[in-house]
Amino acid sequence: MAKSSDGGKLSKKSYEARLPEVRAALVRMQFELKSARFPVVLVVAGVEASGKGDVVNILNGWLDPRGFETFAFHEPTDEERDRPAMWRYWRTLPPSGRMAIYSGGWHTDAINEDPRTAREIEQFDAMMRRISWFEGQLAASGALIVKVWLSLSKSAQRARLQDLESDPRTAWRVAPDDWKSHRDYDRLARLADRMRAATHQPGAPWYLVDAEDARARNLAVADILLSRFRIHMRAQARVKATAGKPHRRVVPLRPTGLRRLLSLPLESRLSQPDYEKKRDKWLGRLNRVVRAAGQERRSIVWVFEGWDAAGKGGAIRRLADAIDARDFRVIPVAKPTDEEKAHHYLWRFWRHVPRTGMITIYDRSWYGRVLVERLEGFATESEWKRAYRELNEFELELSEHGVIVLKFWMHISKDEQLRRFRDREKTSYKRHKMHAEDWRNRRKWASYEIAVGDMLALTSSRHAPWHLVAANNKRHARLEILRTSCRQIEAALGL
Amino acid sequence: MAKSSDGGKLSKKSYEARLPEVRAALVRMQFELKSARFPVVLVVAGVEASGKGDVVNILNGWLDPRGFETFAFHEPTDEERDRPAMWRYWRTLPPSGRMAIYSGGWHTDAINEDPRTAREIEQFDAMMRRISWFEGQLAASGALIVKVWLSLSKSAQRARLQDLESDPRTAWRVAPDDWKSHRDYDRLARLADRMRAATHQPGAPWYLVDAEDARARNLAVADILLSRFRIHMRAQARVKATAGKPHRRVVPLRPTGLRRLLSLPLESRLSQPDYEKKRDKWLGRLNRVVRAAGQERRSIVWVFEGWDAAGKGGAIRRLADAIDARDFRVIPVAKPTDEEKAHHYLWRFWRHVPRTGMITIYDRSWYGRVLVERLEGFATESEWKRAYRELNEFELELSEHGVIVLKFWMHISKDEQLRRFRDREKTSYKRHKMHAEDWRNRRKWASYEIAVGDMLALTSSRHAPWHLVAANNKRHARLEILRTSCRQIEAALGL
């Protein structure tokens, strides 16, 4: 399954003969990487005492330390524990043009948990699934992922541990846990096999390196990195040449979504007194359920999407009225910052995932990928097409961590939008809300309908369903959002 | 000392009569803020039960929640505890054009510590000093800081607590601690006085608001915010008009620094065999002291400054050889990202302050403020002149938290630089290191010497001294840095 280096012994002389060439190639790689449009993620994992730390340190000596960072994950901090499992890895990802080395990767933690019961094995497998999503998403976005597994036979491991212990300069590196993992060698090896099988995929393959001879091991890791880098540079050059064509003809992928959208009755009305009475009732109820969610340490994520002028801002204000201001933040999603642009497109949403018990309200969201980015050609066809799966994966990760995900599409008719645009242009204190692209987007109404339909059909899931809100009448829409939010949160809490 | 609102009672009718105007003004303020070049920091602090949370929630209802965030600080997370005290506040600061509301501010934590012993009072005063530095630095950079203290007499506090407790909908908001702080009213009031006196300064004054009448209180806070905003907008418009002139004539502020720089003997040499022997000895020693620092949970910050081509990169690589790659990160300081540009100039360095026991190596640093920014006119004269104090404050905060700060200026002669530039241009794999601005900076050598001299004279402190390194000979320089680093760390650890 995974490719393997030759291993074998390497004399000091032939090692040193190869060093100048390898080091020069590494520095050249770093220089080329600077202007590349992808990041490099190098994982150095392996069995205990296989020399992960040594390899990482040696690479650090060979590379220019200003071009990359090294990470090793120990106990999660409480900020990390309070968020979905992959958050701590997302936050360390290097931007395009830079490299990060992960000692142990995200794979070692799961193995160290040493799952035994059926339930533990299930959690282990769920983690493997998340890891393979994570790596799959990164690889698909163009990141170069190089994963090396340093292997060592049981007897070689014993010899290495004894060597380390007998030298007073290195004895401190051998902990009682290391001997324990030596005794458990066979079980841990089976677990590692299972891990590698589950996370070996195109764009993120595992390379097995025999770690018995330290010199051969070091060179093998460098050689794998260098050759993958060369291949990747060539492949990325080809990708760039074909990418970025705006999408002309918009055809629905799954017409059921469009039908659902078009069949929404938009003319529901609600009188002002009726609205006020009901609103106060539902605001009170929302306040209670949100506090109940906080007490159960459940987070909430609200996603607001909708046509320009559909009333997202007003709906968010109404929601916010029911929630303690210290418990939520609103993230308006507009143009990404340059730090965001240099990362995977989901990175900027991962950044704002709420801590346990807290709330994030996204005013527009990751769905831009399959709406504006699809229609304006900011994403290539293969990018936005695979995004449906990626967005589902993202939301499932939130939901598995206990985050309640509430998604609203605020729907208005084309005529109603026109009325609101004209009203905005007439009213001095609303004029700042109008932008040139609002009119441009409006001209693409039919294409957007198709994209919204596909989004509804392909990303509505049991744990994160889409709620369609008829929003021609603002009062009706706001109440509908309050009511639906309450009910979904109550259901999630089992109330 | 602090300005005070009238207080007094406000009828529901006159309150509601004023609301539309106040809310419209707040929304207008948010709109104007969007294109302003400063952030707004609103602190709502006050005695227990004065309604901080209510005020914050009401402001949230009046404002557009997409334009700001609200923060309340509870127990620090372990990531926060592992860094200097002000780090957790720095990380939440809004960028230019946005606002943040701080419920309780950074002032409440210190008061809640309820210091009594002389030692505790001393820590309290140290925290007050840090807060006043923090606010002073923000205000000087153009941030609008509005701090409101909600006051309540002891009897009014008792009445409010009783009110809250008697209503089943609000009873949960009264904790046993609240009654305790009521019993301690007088001592806490004296402490709050002391806090306000210590942190009341130009650009960050306290406004006292009588919180007995909730309606008058709400309007008073909004009015203070609005009027400070109007004044600030006008003042900032004036500042912009006069700013940004490049500095033509460079005159030393403190000639002692320049003399120290010019008197450094640059011609120290070291033979290759001699170097290798000593280097290995000092690398080993550095490895030991760095591990010892980690075990004592002390962080280390290395700062490398020096002429172009002085050998900073090589020196950093040599250092890195002695340190476990998983314990340090190198931060190359180049052009700020747009997120960084939208914040205070120190924000991007605060971001990378290491956790307890970890290491950050800054390749160039905050001293850019008094070097390139001074000479190229990126900072105004008043900005770079006050920066000396700000940089000292920053480093003292690091040092008070136990961070060991090591600062090196790598010094070469103008001739040596020329030799190295020519060598870089000749050598293919070094050519990428040369930039047009290297030649431009070189033409300003004499001005840079003056700026470096001032930096040495004005920012060398006992806790963060400048080490001048004669770097015409690379071997000598690298060894000198290893040796000096070892000694300073050993001294800091009391070894």
Image (cartoon, coloured by chain):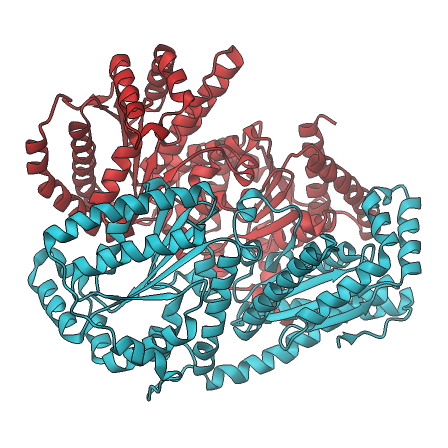
Chain colours: A cyan, B red
Q: What residue is shown at x 54% (from left), y 32% (from top)?
A: B460
* Residue A21 drawn at (x, y percent): 76, 71
Q: Is residue A495 above or below residue A245?
A: above
Q: Residue A262, relative to residue B438: is it above or below?
A: below
Residue A295 placement (x, y as % from top left): 44, 40
Left-right relation of B234 to A228:
left
- Residue in front for this viewpoint, A195 or B470: A195
User: Does residue A352 appear in the picture of this structure?
Assistant: no
Task: Give the number of callouts.
Answer: 0
The location of residue B129, given as percent across then percent down, is 42, 24
| Quadrant of the image containing the N terminus of chain B | top left
Q: Quadrant of the C terminus of chain B?
A: top right
Decide if residue B275 is on the left or right side of residue B82: right
Task: Answer above or below: position of A46 versus B218.
Answer: below
Q: Nearer the viewer, residue A332 or B427?
A: A332
Q: Is residue B58 left or right of residue B129?
A: left
Instruction: Tell me, yes or no, if residue A144 can be seen here.
Output: yes
Most distant residue in the bottom direction? A249
Which residue is most to the front? Answer: A495
Query: What percent of the width, then of the height, locates residue A80?
Result: 55, 48
Residue at point 93%, 45% (across, down): A166
Quarter-of-image position of residue A70: bottom right
